Structure formats: C-alpha cells, structure tokens
Image (tube, rainbow, N blue to C red):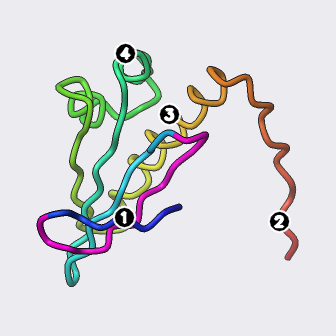
Amino acid sequence: MKVLYEKHSSESTPAFFYEGRQLFHLHLRGMEINATFHTDFKSRLRLTENQSIDWRLRDEIRKRTWAGFAFESSKDLGPFMELVKAKYQIIAEETGAKPREERPIAV
C-alpha cells in the first residue's frame, strides 16, 4: 500500500499495489467511499472472460483501463474484492510468483 496525493485536489489517496502494479486506489470523502480499479489490456481481457466475476463489474472494466466503483454498503465490497483477487492471481501467474500458502486463522 502507498499513499498517493492527487495533483489537483492535494487529497491523500490510499493505493494498493502488487508486484509493482497498481490494483486499485480509494477516494475517501466524508461518508462516501469510491474505488478506481486499474488494469492493462491483457489482464482486462482475462478479467472480462472470467465468469466467476459479477457481470456488472466485467462490463465496467470492459470499457477502459480503469473503472470507478462506489460503495454504498458493505455488500458492494464483496464483488469488488473478487475482482481484485482475480487480478492479483493474474499478476502472480505472469510474474511466476508462488501462491501463498493459506494458513488457518487462530481463534
């Protein structure tokens, strides 16, 4: 995670990266939370073909290399995180990174 600053508004913007590639960044304005998801041409094609991702999200990323999403409730976060997880896996495959071992959560 890095904190970036928008040029025009000087607002801090939390941005999330994996292997040097930006996954998404957030805009936090009062109670409003928006995310901008970033993708390149190759990963965008793979994501739009992935049937496990909600069709509305696939439609948004099909249009251009970035897509904006507004979170009105916590229910909106689940499908968005599935999109982020799919891009994370694509980057891991491209870079040859070994998948992290999932560990049980201690209670």
Q: Residue at x 21, y 34 (%)?
A: 60
Q: Residue at x 57, y 44 (%)?
A: 18
Secondary element at image label 3: helix
Residue linked to disc 3: 87
Secondary element at image label 2: loop
In magenta segment, residue 12: yes
Mark 2 crowdedness (10 Å alpha carbons): few <14, some 14-19, many ≥20: few
Residue linked to disc 1: 4
- Which portion, as a residue range, is magenta? 8-20
Tell me how far mark 1 sits from mark 4, CA to CA: 27 Å
Q: Amino acid at mark 4?
A: Leu
Point out the tag, 4 or 3, that comes first from the N-terminus. 4
Residue 93 on image: x %, y %: 66, 22
Q: Residue at x 44, y 44 (%)?
A: 22
Tell me how far mark 4 sits from mark 2, CA to CA: 34 Å
Mark 4 crowdedness (10 Å alpha carbons): few <14, some 14-19, many ≥20: some
User: Does residue 37 appear left or right of residue 87 in this picture?
Assistant: left
Residue linked to disc 4: 45
Relative depth, front residue between 9 and 77 = 9
Q: Amino acid at mark 2?
A: Ile
Q: Quadrant of the C terminus?
A: bottom right
Tell me the quarter of the picture where residue 99 sits.
Answer: top right
Tell me how far mark 4 sits from mark 3, CA to CA: 11 Å
Secondary element at image label 1: strand
Tell me how far mark 2 sits from mark 1, CA to CA: 32 Å
Q: Residue at x 25, y 37 (%)?
A: 66
In contact (CB < 8 Å): disc 3 and disc 2 = no
Tell me how far mark 3 sits from mark 2, CA to CA: 24 Å
In magenta segment, residue 1: no
Residue 105 bears which disc, if any? Answer: 2
